[in-house]
Amino acid sequence: MKTFRKYQFGSKGAATTKINQLGVDEEGNPTHSHAIVHLGNLVEVEGTHDEEGNELTAPVMSSTYHLDVLWDGEPEPSWDAQMVWPNPNVLGVHTFGSSSAIREYISKAKELHPEFFPEPTEEELI
């Protein structure tokens, strides 16, 4: 079973150290079967541009470095302190293609953060 989780670190170096602890060979290649995507520092506030595409205001980037991991099995417990649960309504930055892993992620997010999944009002159901 694959398990999808999101993580944040104080820096790219801290993230790289944690990844390397999963195992690398003498050439620096991973010896584990987990898929890791470096998202980097995320955009917190979009920048603005004029009609010609010239930047008017620069985007505001997060001060933390982000990774997504598709674990081959259960998540590594030593990573729990860096695990984050962003609102799934803004999950669009990145997900993996495994529908079962995404279902498991959303299920766990609902368990831990029910406020992200409010019940629809009667008006919304109509």
Image (tube, rainbow, N blue to C red):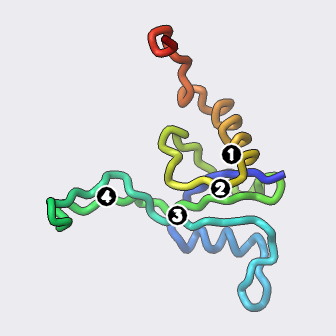
Q: CA distance from mark 2 to mark 1?
A: 7 Å
Name the residue nearer the viewer: 11 or 30: 30
Q: Which residue is depicted at the point 22% across and 57% down?
A: 48
Q: Mark 4: few, some, or many residues within 10 Å (few <14, many ≥20)?
A: few
Which residue in the protein does label 1 denote? 102
Q: CA distance from mark 1 to mark 3?
A: 17 Å
Mark number displayed over residue 19: none
Residue farthest to the top? 122
The amino acid beneath tag 1 is Ile
Q: CA distance from mark 3 to mark 2?
A: 13 Å
Q: Earlier in the sequence, mark 2 or mark 4?
A: 4
Q: Nearer the viewer, mark 3 or mark 2?
A: 2
Q: Is residue 125 left or right of residue 28?
A: left
Q: Nearer the viewer, mark 2 or mark 4?
A: 2
The amino acid beneath tag 3 is Leu
Q: Mark 2: few, some, or many residues within 10 Å (few <14, many ≥20)?
A: some
Which residue in the protein does label 4 denote? 60
User: Element type at marker 3?
Assistant: strand
Q: Which residue is depicted at the point 56% across and 18% down?
A: 119
Q: Earlier in the sequence, mark 3 or mark 2?
A: 3
Q: Earlier in the sequence, mark 4 or mark 1?
A: 4
Q: Are marks 2 and 1 in contact (CB under 8 Å)?
A: yes
Q: Earlier in the sequence, mark 2 or mark 1?
A: 2
Please, is residue 70 above or below residue 106 in the view? below
Q: Mark 3: few, some, or many residues within 10 Å (few <14, many ≥20)?
A: some
Name the residue nearer the viewer: 99 or 47: 99
Which residue in the protein does label 2 denote? 96
Q: Quadrant of residue 59?
A: bottom left
Q: Position of residue 97 (x, y in %)?
A: 67, 55
